[in-house]
């Protein structure tokens, strides 16, 4: 049985840390969508809140504030079944 939960988030900000000599880290922040389209209202009905923050060193301009993204969550064991 596949146990996948699809969430919809909007990127709310990006912070850049570091320097040219030490390298840069990009911290991205996301919040669950709440409005803006019928699809967003439907997602909000089932997942009315959520926040995600993560940092990476190689994803400059990978996520843009104001853009919406799907986030699929599944157990690793289910992913291994899909890949095989």
Image (spheres, rainbow, N blue to C red):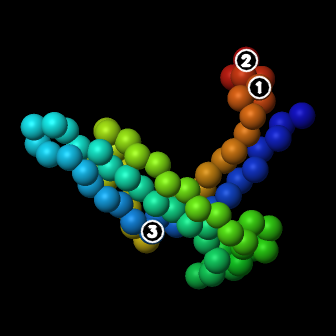
Q: Secondary structure at mark 1?
A: helix
| Closer to us: 13 or 61 | 13
Left or right of residue 67: residue 23: left
For mark 2, what is the residue? 84
The residue at the point 37 percent across, 52 percent down is 27
Looking at the image, which residue is at 11% across and 42% down?
20
The residue mark sitting in front, 2 or 3, is 3
Q: Do residues under tags 1 and 3 come within 8 Å of each other at their CB atoms?
A: no
Q: Is residue 13 visible?
A: yes
The answer to whether the residue labelled 1 contacts the one labelled 2, judged by CB atoms less than 8 Å apart, is no
* Residue corresponding to mark 1: 77
Q: Earlier in the sequence, mark 2 or mark 3?
A: 3
Residue 18 in the image: x percent, y percent? 20, 46
Determine whether the residue tagged by mark 2 lies in a helix, strand or loop.
loop
At mark 3, the secondary structure is: strand
* Residue position marked by numbered label 3 in the rendering: 12
Distance Cα–Cα, label 1 vs label 3:
31 Å
Crowd rating for badge 2 (residues with CA inside 10 Å; few <14, some 14–19, many 20+): few
Of pointers 1 and 2, the one earlier in the residue sequence: 1
Q: Work out which residue is located at the far left of the displayed protein and give it.
A: 21
Q: Which residue is nearer to you in this view: 29 or 63?
A: 29
**Residue 25, quarter of picture:** top left
User: Residue at position x 77%, y 25% from top?
Assistant: 77
Label 1 or label 2, whichever lies nearer to me, is 1
Residue 51 x %, y %: 59, 62
In the image, residue 23 sits, relative to residue 53, either above or below, namely above
Tell me how far mark 1 sits from mark 2, CA to CA: 11 Å
Which of the numbered marks, if any, corresponds to residue 39? none
- Image location (x, y in percent) of residue 13: 39, 66
Q: Residue 59's spot in the image, x, y percent? A: 34, 44
Q: Quadrant of the N terminus?
A: top right
- Outermost residue, top side: 84
């Amino acid at each position: 049985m596949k146990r996948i939960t699809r969430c919809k988030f909007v990127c709310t900000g990006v912070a850049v840390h570091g320097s040219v000599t030490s390298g840069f880290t990009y911290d991205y922040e996301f919040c669950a969508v709440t409005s803006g389209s019928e699809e967003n209202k439907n997602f909000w009905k089932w997942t009315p809140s959520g926040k995600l923050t993560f940092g990476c060193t190689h994803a400059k301009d990978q996520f843009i504030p104001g853009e919406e993204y799907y986030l699929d969550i599944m157990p690793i064991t289910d992913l291994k079944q899909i890949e095989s």
